[in-house]
Image (cartoon, coloured by chain):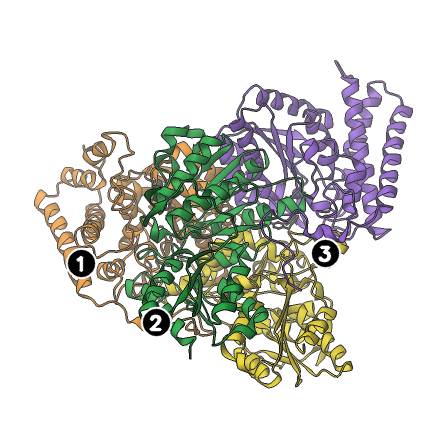
Chain colours: A orange, B purple, C yellow, D green
Amino acid sequence: MTIENFNTDRGLALLTVMERIRAFEEQACLAAERDKLVLGAIHPSIGQEGVAAGVMSNLNKDDIILSTHRGHGHTLAKGASSVAMMRELLGREGGCCGGKGGSMHIADFEVGMLGANGVVSANITIAAGAAHAIKLLGDDRIVVDIFGDGAINRGPFLEGLNWSTVFDLPILFVCEDNQYSATTKTSSMTGGDGPAARATALGLRATEVDGNDAEAVADVAAEICARLRAGGKPEFLHAVTYRQTGHTSFDPAAYRPEGEAAKHRLENDPIARQRDILLTAGISEQALTDIRGEAQAEMIEALRLAAASPFPDDDTVFLDVQDLGSPAVEAY
Amino acid sequence: MTIENFNTDRGLALLTVMERIRAFEEQACLAAERDKLVLGAIHPSIGQEGVAAGVMSNLNKDDIILSTHRGHGHTLAKGASSVAMMRELLGREGGCCGGKGGSMHIADFEVGMLGANGVVSANITIAAGAAHAIKLLGDDRIVVDIFGDGAINRGPFLEGLNWSTVFDLPILFVCEDNQYSATTKTSSMTGGDGPAARATALGLRATEVDGNDAEAVADVAAEICARLRAGGKPEFLHAVTYRQTGHTSFDPAAYRPEGEAAKHRLENDPIARQRDILLTAGISEQALTDIRGEAQAEMIEALRLAAASPFPDDDTVFLDVQDLGSPAVEAY
Amino acid sequence: MTIMTYANAALEAIRQSMQSDPTVWCVGEDLGRGGVFGQYKGLREEFGEARISDAPISEAAIMGAAFGAAMVGTRPVVEMRFADFALCATDELVNQIAKARFMFGGQSRAPMVIRKPMGLWRSSAAQHSQSLESWYVHIPGLVVLCPATPQDNYSMLKAAIACDDPVVYLEHKNIWALEGDVDFDHQITLGEASTRRTGADVTIVSWSNTANLAVEAADTLADKNIDAEVIDLRSLWPWDKSAVLDSVRKTGRLVVAHESVAVGGFGAEIVATVAEQVASSLKGPVRRLGAPRSLIAYAPNLEDKMRVTAEMIVTAAQETFE
Amino acid sequence: MTIMTYANAALEAIRQSMQSDPTVWCVGEDLGRGGVFGQYKGLREEFGEARISDAPISEAAIMGAAFGAAMVGTRPVVEMRFADFALCATDELVNQIAKARFMFGGQSRAPMVIRKPMGLWRSSAAQHSQSLESWYVHIPGLVVLCPATPQDNYSMLKAAIACDDPVVYLEHKNIWALEGDVDFDHQITLGEASTRRTGADVTIVSWSNTANLAVEAADTLADKNIDAEVIDLRSLWPWDKSAVLDSVRKTGRLVVAHESVAVGGFGAEIVATVAEQVASSLKGPVRRLGAPRSLIAYAPNLEDKMRVTAEMIVTAAQETFE
Ligand SMILES: Cc1ncc(C[n+]2csc(CCOP(=O)(O)OP(=O)(O)O)c2C)c(N)n1
Ligand SMILES: Cc1ncc(C[n+]2csc(CCOP(=O)(O)OP(=O)(O)O)c2C)c(N)n1
Ligand SMILES: [Mg+2]
Ligand SMILES: [Mg+2]
């Protein structure tokens, strides 16, 4: 492989982000399975890191993203603190949502991450609205909403994409297609030619990309974001990837054809592929090992810190419900 | 105009149905505006009769249709009694829904008409389910669901069409595109290339037709129904027409460009166009006048009978709520 | 002080709010032509397309997009046209809007008003007539308002738009044309009930259009030498518990009346609260009026069977003396 | 009589119903692999793809299509996965399914069961933990069931599938593994409460998993010489008013306890009904327990603050003697 005009800095940055995501989720899975410290469900994005890294590398801190139940990677890549995120997964004080949201509702408004969502597809219209506000306010930020392949079968997909074209909003919809919806092969429940065809029919320019090629994702997202920043119309990106784990950290995913996951792990892992690219580009094995080592050290420390954090103060259960009326009515 | 292989019987039948629909709705509007006998809103389909006539001419009595708030035409064309329908519009005993539904919930299960619907787009998934049952039961009926151009912007459009392809159901979706959604020009709120493009993206074979050419609608619907009866996949028909009246019988529709409605009335009325075809095919003016006269006489009589009917028995307010529990709890 | 209709009072509240705060905007189907009940007439001319925005027929997107826009610095007024259609956006309202602030640990607000015209309105039948206020009161995170007069529709809508909580704003469709004095300077504190009539003998608690019927009933009761106090809750969440409890402590008798279905209606909450907290003050049986647990039919006589009327309130009040 | 889990009791009810009636079928996401809680395990092998049907992630279509199929001669069992997601299909349930029979003048029925696993379940947070049974009780046309034991989950689900009304069937997610005796011959009449314990001193009314806590509480109360009667309503619509009123007439004391938010919860309906109809039998204050009007958090300690516990029921029962 020869690589012309290769941007080494970006290449290393992409790898770093992916390694950090992988390490974060490996620690999160350990915290769940080994330590029983994560009590709610977690949905790892192991094997899908290329999409998060590639897309987010083109966003500024004040650009906005929204994500799904499988959103650790997007959130980290957008710049959230791994410690605050890990605390959130453990339901602790100092978690980015004060321990109230957990993995499925992770959010960090400081870095423009307006929330994962436990309801499939729900963020699509909300993201369109965020872009709508940007346009109303005459702002120059852009919005990226990421959702899964299963989300394209719910109504909000149509309503939100239609909304974005009708109001001509600065938004990129990314379908992170890991080929499964929980235990179901998504294609078996999806009519027609899939995500991009639907988006095109709704008036969006749609692009397809190999989601496990972080460089390709970064390239195509760069072009799209540039168009959006130049006042372009809403766009759609279909990034094909693969979920190497079960649906949740506890799901053995026995419903997959034998060997399928193993093949992807061996031949189509976005981190391994990026490492190969970097090696070809002349980066030393040692440099790559260091990146991984640092990522792992960061996340081991994040878990240690999170586990040492107290649970939130009991009284916070009545905080941030709403301004009017007391939530603590004499219910019990 | 020369007409080869023209099917005179069908041509006359199409005209007859359209004249009956027109006459029914003219009487209904009089009952509403002149007589104040229709208390709820009615949504006339005047100018759109070609779609109802053309599509329904291909259905058997036990085939199933579902419709919208603008459903008088479809219901009549499917074979419902004009008297029972008029009684329903007046909220009388003997109305097809016992006076409980009114215009927006007109239904006649005897002729396979499973209901108009007051919620835009809602019947799309319900119709898919009716077709689903047919398939489960191993029946050979088909289902037709008709909805407006505004309905394609709601989620159930995507969910219901996707459902029909995933389960490969015997259903035809008809978008009766009268170009308006209430006071809004639908195209201004619709992204992309419109109904057929969306249906195609969802995996349905889609056909476009001039909805004011009843012959053309009948032809294309005949082909589609034949394919469905032969076990074919779900299909979509986009029939373009024009709403000659306001949204409701009380709406002056002043928001339309000047002259637009008049032009359609003069040049694009489906009844006038069908009459021209029949004249060209050698039918006498008198024969056409007779058809109209009979239709008008039928509907004047229907209104007379309806107006003479009593209101439903008060006790029916507690009938047909549900089997379990009393609806007449000591509420008042 | 001017005389205005209930509809125009709301329109004026919106106009003033939009004038003073450029982040306020309205979105819903057909708004550009004034909205289905004319509640937005003239506003597009004044504020333009972007701030009086049409919408595709897509309630989920209207609700969801408005929420997204509320999180990003604007204050949307969402028009749902008929309260019934808001059911097409229930996930957005209940799982998203009501929960976001808490779920995200206080990082976000959803300062938005969701207008949902509700209630019985001449032969509109089962899908265009519902009153589901009790649903929303049951959902933590939401404010629930039910104005009954032009003044309240003006003052409450202004306060709702200024409020940082998501507000479910339930206007009654049957009183758009109701006229009354409106004082633009009159401010109200959301959550305070309005005592529409003071009285010593029996407390009648109500809201929305039924509160107007309760005032009528109180006049009739006065002729029968029963001095009724009429409390128009106006705000169901928060609700003015002390106004109700104080009044019952004073009168010793309670009637609660609402248009919505009695079973599981918000009237139950009021009666239950009274039973829990001031049972010993009661001098007679409490009475609760609401619709039977049946559906709203199209035929006018059947529709009427679902109504709570002023006469029924009179009778119920008399029954508290039995 | 066999010992079965709550989940398997339901599975068996479905299996038997499908065996005896070929028009019964189940539809929902991931059903082919047994469903998200394993409640459909093995059924696809026995009944095939068409009758244990997967579905796209599209709750509105699942609900709407099942309704269409119910009108055309089949009896669908709809799986909503988490009760929370059913909010994505609210129009379908409330505006369509509940109303069709009436609106169409009796021409149609919607014989379908909508399974909505509800309630608190280990750190599932605000969008996967709700209990909204009071909403559905408020909607004419719907039957609302909340089984609390394996036997009831078997008998009630069988009866629900056989019932011609649309049934909202709310299983509690936290007791899938709860074991108990199940007698396949035991039939129940929907609408009849189950008196889980008879007692003379105080009536405790509850349902769903909270009824199990109420039984625990009654045991503790017995140690304190308070003889509690525990009424597990099981069916919220219709609800067994006479069982509750008779019991209160006997004991003169009432506690109502449920997991859902207290404000606007169905407990209010029960307390209100008692206050209206048997107030004079009451010998002490009534107590109503439900969640505060806050949201369900992820952190376990905050989640616990939203719980109604057996201890709280004990205390409330003691307070009725004050
Ligand atoms: C509306 C709704 N329906 C069902 C679920 C349950 N659920 C959670 S994740 C999931 C699969 C989603 O698949 P996809 O969109 O492809 O995302 P992925 O999990 O693959 O990232 C389902 C069905 C949900 N959370 N929300
Ligand atoms: C979900 C929903 N939203 C809004 C409405 C109000 N409404 C009734 S008819 C209509 C316009 C529908 O347009 P279209 O689908 O084109 O049908 P048409 O009236 O033109 O036949 C609207 C917005 C409704 N009934 N249901
Ligand atoms: Mg997926
Ligand atoms: Mg139209």
In the picture, which quadrant includes the N terminus of chain C? Answer: bottom right
For residue D207, what is the image quadrant? bottom left
Q: Amino acid at mark 1?
A: Leu
* Residue appearing at x 74%, y 32% in the figure: B77
Which of C2 and D177 lies nearest the eye of the viewer? D177
Which of D31 and A97 lies nearest the eye of the viewer? D31
Q: Pointer 2: what residue?
A: D225
* Residue appearing at x 67%, y 57% in the figure: C36
Say what secondary structure mark 1 lies in.
Answer: helix
Q: Same subunit under labels 3 and 1?
A: no
Count of marks, rendered view: 3
Q: Residues within 10 Å of mark 2 (few under 14, many from 20)?
A: few
Residue C303, numbered circle: 3
In the picture, which quadrant includes the C terminus of chain C? Answer: bottom right
Which is in the foreground here, disc 2 or disc 3? 2
- Residue placed farthest to the left in the image? A286
Residue contact at pointers 2 and 1, CB within 8 angstroms: no
- Residue placed farthest to the right in the image? B286
Q: Amino acid at mark 2?
A: Asn
As drawn, C132 above or below B166: below
Q: Chain of mark 1?
A: A
Q: Chain of mark 3?
A: C
Can residue C311 be seen in this snapshot?
A: yes
Residue A325: image location, x then y, percent: 47, 74
Q: CA distance from mark 2 to mark 1?
A: 50 Å
